[in-house]
Structures are given as C-alpha cells and as structure tokens.
Image (cartoon, helix red, strand yellow):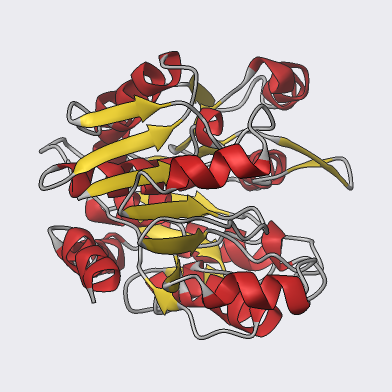
Amino acid sequence: MRIGIFDPYLDDIGGGEKYMMTLASCLSKDNEVYVFWDDQEVFKNLTRRFSIDLSKVNFYKNIFSSKFSFIQKIIETKKFDIIIFLSDGSIPVTLSNKTFIHIQQPLPNVRTNLLSSLKLKRINAVFCNSTFTKSFADKELGIQSKVLYPSIEIKARLEKKENYILHVGRFRDARVNNEDYKRQGMMVQSFKEMIDGGFKDWKFVLCVGLNSADEENFNKIKEIANGYPIEFLVNKSNDELWDIYSKAKIYWHATGFGEDLNLHPEFAEHFGISTVEAMGAGCVPVVINAGGQKEIITDGENGYLWNSIEELKKKTIELAKNERKLNILSIAAKKRAEYFAGERFCRELKEIILE
C-alpha cells in the first residue's frame, strides 16, 4: 500500500516525532511509505537523535503546507491508500481510501461543530498515545478513540550503577509563570535543597534536548546549579542517552507541576517515553502524579509518584538510603517497561489501520 504520514511538528524532534517516525519505520517494512515534509535535513537529525531506521521511508512534498491550495491538497491525497495525520486540532479532508488521525496531547480548545463533525465521519479511526490523552480527545470531539502506547526500544547496557539521579527531556521555555515547560529549573532547585540539607554522594544529571531559541533561559538554570553536583548533557545521541540511562539509579520527571491541569491538561506529560526508557534500564522512577505517568507507574510497586516538592525530596532520600528497596523497585521497573517494548507497537498499529 501507498501510505502518507504528516506531522506538523516534525522539526521539533520530540517524543511526538519519535512516535510518528517509529510508525513510519514500522509500516515501511511492508508498504511504500512517504512523509510529507520539505526539509530532508530533518531526517538526518531524527535518525541521529532516535536511532530509528528510516532507510525505507521516502520524502514527499508537504501538501499540508500553506503553499498548497485546498483543491491541490485533496487531489494529492487521492494518490495514497492511507494517510495518517498527527492532529494539532485540525481535521484533514482527504480523498485517500483511508484516513487516520493521531492525537498526542489534550486539545482543550478544540470544539466540534457541524463542519468538524462532517469531517470526522470520513476519518476511519482516531488513536491516542495514552488513556490520559484519549479522555480529552473523546470528550472534546465526541468520539471513541483508541489507545496505541508509544514504542519503546530498550537498549540498556551492562553498566555498573552509580549514584545518579537522572532527568531526560527537551528544554523549552514555556513562557508560563516564568517556568520552563518540563520544570527542570524546579528540579535543580529541589536537588540543591537536598544537598544543602545534608544529602550527599549523589549527582543530578539532566540530559536535555535544546534549540538555539531557548539557550538564554537554559543558561540561567545552569548558572543556578553552579557549585553543586549537577551535570547537564545537551543534545546527546540515542546511544549516548542509553549509556547514562544504564548508569543512573533514580529517574525524576516533573512536567505539569504547579499548573492547573484541569484548565490546561496539555501542560502535563501526555505519556512519558523517557520515563519508560529509564525504567527499562533499571532506573527507579520518582515522578509527578499527573498525566500519562500514572498509567506507567504503580506507586510503591515499580516506582514512586509524588504530589509536592517535599514529597519528591522525601521519597528520593528514603530510596537513596535503602539499597534493598532500590533493587526491588529497579527489577519491577524493568519488568513494567518490557510491556511497552518489542513488537507490540507494530502489531497494534496494523490492527488499527487494517481492521
């Protein structure tokens, strides 16, 4: 089959892009797959960052850009058997045999009207990356979407574990309450407070993806970390990332902290790919009790969930002092991560688009 895939955020090179390119790679094994995008340099960056095999995936002119008229777009879509569209809230009109929408995050400002309802009738299925995202998509669009959890490829090394607390995530200036989107600044401050309170012999490592537009604010966070056992690793490759996953003992994540997530659910972590990857390498997650993280972790069984900064610090310190508990939770975290790995993603994806 001839399959076209569109992700309007492809050059962001974040979790959503990893999801869509994994999808493209999976389908390219048995189909003719095209990605609608004009800048081929993006493919090189995606391959380096995520180590995804895109050798059988082709480029196609970005028919969803503003350069194409509505008529031109739908004429081009007729050349495809299937189109898979990552929605930013919009619903495409196509003449492909089948059209599927993927939703990566809550879209709270989307409202259905007569036109969007008519468009949705031509969509074969909508699938989301988590039950968290699905709950908002179903409510706002009046649909019954499916859940297809992201694919996780576990590449853990046989490294000796060290006293590292790890965080992985893009640095992005959210421009909300003067905080960064992933709350890396808050985590740096929390770790400093732990050190000032007597916590010792541990290092906090932040592995971040960084664009030039956010460098100024990122450097401010680096400045407040001066003098503390805090290390920043920037724009590392997938292989380098797995090296540090394999060495770390504890994993932190705080996206959505301090936000009104009832009003802005999109500020929570929509799933948590890096959390699962860390667990796959035996890191014990100590993460915020919000968004998709709650679908990954059972508190006290394969990691910890927290609701306040004090709880984050307390659970981390207790875990760091209890090697036996750390080992038990590490084994359980690995087992939980295995659910998201393997051929599950490709199998479930094909069930959705071929049913």
Q: Quadrant of residue 344?
A: bottom left
Please indicate whether residue 51 sits to the left or right of residue 261 in the image: left
Q: Does 286 sit above or below residue 78? A: below
Question: Horizontal and vertical percent for residue 227?
Answer: 64, 20
Q: Nearer the viewer, residue 229 or 98?
A: 98
Q: Closest to the observer: 18 or 232? A: 18
Q: Quadrant of the C terminus?
A: bottom left
In front of the other: 336 or 318: 336
* Residue beneath the point at 17% across and 41% down: 155
Query: Which residue is at a point 53% across and 58% down the rendered structure image?
Result: 104
Find residue 338 and report its image quarter: bottom left
Q: Residue furthest right?
A: 177
Closest to the observer, 354 or 188: 354
Disc count in the image?
Answer: 0
Q: Is residue 13 left or right of residue 289?
A: left
Residue 224 shows in the view: yes
**Can you give x and y, in whole percent of width and height, for residue 151 in the image?**
28, 55
Residue 226, compared with residue 128, is above or below; it is above
Q: Quadrant of residue 301?
A: bottom left
- The spot of residue 197 in percent (x, y) is 66, 47
Q: Is residue 90 left or right of residue 296?
A: right
- Residue drawn at x 65%, y 66% is 106
Q: Position of residue 196 (x, y in %)?
A: 67, 41
Q: Name the residue rendered at 68%, 34% in the picture.
A: 172
Is residue 161 placed above or below 150 in the rendered structure?
A: above
Q: Is residue 166 visible?
A: no
